[in-house]
Amino acid sequence: MSGDFERIAKRLARVGVASRRGAEAMIAEGRVAVNGKRIDSPALNVGPDDRIELDGKPLAAKEPVRMWRYHKPAGLVTTTADEKGRRTIFDALPGDLPRVMSIGRLDLNSEGLLLLTNDGDLKRRLELPATGWVRKYRVRVKGVPTDAMLAPLGRGITVEGETFLPMQVTLDRQQGANAWLTIGLREGKNREIRRAMEAVGLSVNRLIRTSYGPFQLGDLARGAVEELRPKVLRDQLGITRTPQAPGTKSPAPRPARGRTRPAPGRAR
């Protein structure tokens, strides 16, 4: 197969209309047509000359890749819509942002750094554990952590049949009945830190993500959004602002090598 061809769901994701999984759902709903014929399966390869329509409108050309840092407050869910009617991050984002997707998630009661992008393919790549990127968190727990309690986390533990990779755990300080920890993960399973802490006898009462790979929360105000500069995308991801030709691949993300910008102080 020619390198100019790719799966239809990937093409939709590259244009930024949805993540790859979301694009597959659009196809299953019959919203996508190729060369005038409506399709219902993502198992189709398309080339640069194929005419693709979404909801009866021609698919837009791929926009330049963009990314933003967002300081997510607690109390928002990281979904486009919530079945319980809770407020989402997309309800809180500024109205002048283009359509964006979150890279990974933070649960309802978690806060801190959340990366946003307009590129579904980039979203998928940066969520994969294969990037090797460490996600760091400041975590407040109720209890008095000891080396013996924290040791299993550094080896990797299994909770309710699910295995978590080894965590980097540092005790920062004990503050009355609570303690502050710094925790580093190389993957982000659902409620991983909270479940792991419970397994060793500690209860999380505050969780702040301070970094995602080379990208830092720094002094970004709670609820604020800041677009990453083109130089940062080029240096950290090998991405230019010029749209890529269909079928080409971006270089793999580089391992974290420090901050993307000065980040004085700690998130509070």
Image (tube, rainbow, N blue to C red):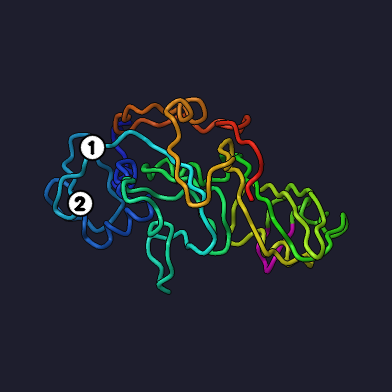
In the drawing, what numbered circle is on residue 54? Answer: 2
Q: Amino acid at mark 1?
A: Ala
Q: Along the horizontal axis of the image, is 15 left or right of 109? A: left
> Residue 128 or 167: which is nearer the viewer?
167
In the drawing, what numbered circle is on residue 124? Answer: none
- To which residue does mark 1 refer? 61
Taking the magenta stretch, the answer to whether it contains residue 254 is no
Farthest bottom residue in view:
84
Q: Along the horizontal axis of the image, is 2 left or right of 216? A: left
Which secondary structure lies at badge 1?
loop
Q: Quadrant of the N terminus?
A: top left
> Residue 119 or 180: which is nearer the viewer?
180
Mark found first going from the N terminus, 1 or 2? 2
At x 18%, y 55%, the residue is 55
Q: Quadrant of residue 46?
A: top left
Q: Position of residue 33 (x, y in %)?
A: 18, 52
- Range covered by the magenta-colored residues: 157-163
At x 61%, y 39%, the residue is 132
Q: Along the horizontal axis of the image, is 160 left or right of 244? A: right
Q: Amino acid at mark 2?
A: Leu
